[in-house]
Amino acid sequence: MDLQTWTWIIVGITFTLYIGIAIWTRASSTKDFYVAGGGVSPLANGLATAADWMSAASFISMAGLISFSGYDGSVYLMGWTGGYVLLALLLAPYLRKFGKFTVPDFIGDRYYSNVARSVAVICALLVSFTYVAGQMRGVGLVFSRFLEVDINTGVIIGMIIVLFYAILGGMKGITYTQVAQYCVLIFAFMVPAVFISIQMTGNPIPQMGLGGSDANGVFLLEKLDSLHRDLGFAEYTSGSKSKLDVFFITAALMVGTAGLPHVIVRFFTVKKVSDARKSAGWALLFIAILYTTAPAIAVFSRINLIETVSNKEYENLPDWLSNWETTGLITFDDKNKDGKVQYVADANINELTVDKDIMVLANPEIAKLPNWVIALVAAGALAAALSTAAGLLLVISASVSHDLIKKMIKPNISEKGELIAARLSAVVAVCVAGYFGINPPDFVAATVALAFGLAAASFFPAIILGIFNKRINKEGAIAGMVIGVLLMLFYMMKFKFEWFGGGTKADWWFGISPEGFGAVAMIVNFIISLIISKFTPAPPKEVQEIVENIRIPSGVGEATH
């Protein structure tokens, strides 16, 4: 069968599975909608958390980014993996003990203020919309190549699918859909990696193939360094980022992880604190499978790309290149009119432009793997993007219906009314998300990295200090969150949006990139929160007792309103 037939079959089967699960697990109460009834097992929650966590950025973009950045791309591996450990150890059990549905719920009650709750809602919406833009672009990329529709149409198809099961099932439907999506995405990620590892090194384990050698006995990394040198690129194993920027990007990704509302809410879906810890452990194991494989895929795809296109006659190039050219994500401009592809570092001579986001998706085609494997990768990429998009949409709808309407605007709203409000806000959210998916500020991984920066600048200090410092009060937390997120927004817009200021790399403060600036804004948030709290009244005694109680790991009941 041809590739498109295989793609329709495999994507059709997986989408039918997701929709079937959503119908089977549809939410009948707000507790089902927000936290899946609080009765998810640690293993299922670990699988769902891993799917929620491994977004289009992890599946599609991370290996592509490492493929082009080499050593510099390791910041994404270190930051995202380390951040998850930080979340599991420092935050998840304590937030579960607090027993609320959402992060703004925690901040509103811990800081005894609707103003704090409102600021947290705004920050949750900012983070979630920035993050979901990356997912929707990922969906568009997959559809544009494998179902041969344009990216914008692909985004709209993805919006309709994710809206269906997010609205119908809420967190309950999303949780069990994400379990299925994890199985699909990890199988789709690993199968081509194993095939290509055997093809290039004879070793079926990609992680070991990365350190292996080819048929001529040359180590793959040495071979790639040599290819890069020949074409004028920096050696793959050398880094160009400053150590300071590497440190701040890694830190921003780590603490941003620990402040991501759509990941934190997963730990409210289990019965007790010990289950939150267990599910965090399971999720870390499931995440590690993909994250340890990504560097191998990055190297395999980079070598294959260079060897199949560099200095080759354009007329004799493999079909995969022309297939991807139709999407506009690879472009060839024969500058010297010699009919050959000059793929080199010098921008004035280089004739081939490759979008970083296509590397994982194109990799099986470049390696000439069977059509069913290529179609499987498309289904896996969609599973990764849609699982995270669904989690983010739920955070957005919960922030509006629960934190804004139920807690502030209309406290006496009925449960049915709150459920309707949650579903309506999800509809609006998916429309906004679709717009950002069609008009994203950057490629997928960079867009997602900015969301981590916003989470680091706003939520992380408020949550950490709220759990571990009884003296932090509402004045300090509100001022810290507002100044932190505004500082990050200013920096992000200055260097990512030309219409705002169009700053260049030479203008970066202290040489720190926008992806790493979230860590700077976080430090500012911490300092302001501590200083203002020191010179303003202490929190009420009952709030201080709540803080003491959060850290006692016993007598934990189910999550409550």
Image (cartoon, grey):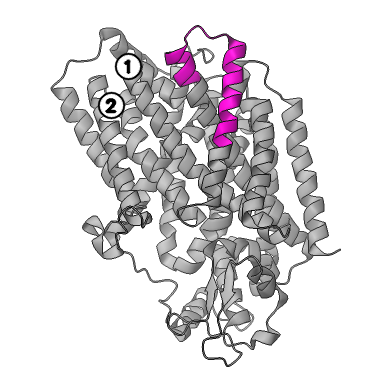
The image quadrant of residue 327 is: bottom right
**Disc 1 + disc 2, Cβ < 8 Å:** yes
Residue at (75% x, 60% y) in the render: 373
Q: Amino acid at mark 1?
A: Ser
Q: Is residue 413 magenta?
A: yes
Residue at (63% x, 80% y) in the render: 308
Q: Is residue 145 left or right of residue 258?
A: right
Q: Is residue 504 magenta?
A: no
Classify 88 as above or below 97: below
* Residue 203, percent from left and from top: 65, 67
* Residue 175, percent from left and from top: 64, 31
**Label 1, label 2: how far apart the Cα atoms are:** 9 Å
**Pointer 2: what residue?**
478
Q: Residue lying furthest bottom in this view?
A: 338
**Pointer 1: what residue?**
113
* Residue 286, percent from left and from top: 59, 44
Classify 217 as above or below 28: below
Q: Amino acid at mark 2?
A: Ile
What span is colored magenta in the figure?
402-430
Task: In this rendered view, identify the residue nearer to me: 552 or 544.
Answer: 544
Task: In this rendered view, identify the residue nearer to me: 455 or 339.
Answer: 339
- SS for callout 1: loop
Q: Residue lying furthest front in this view?
A: 499
Classify 392 as above or below 213: above
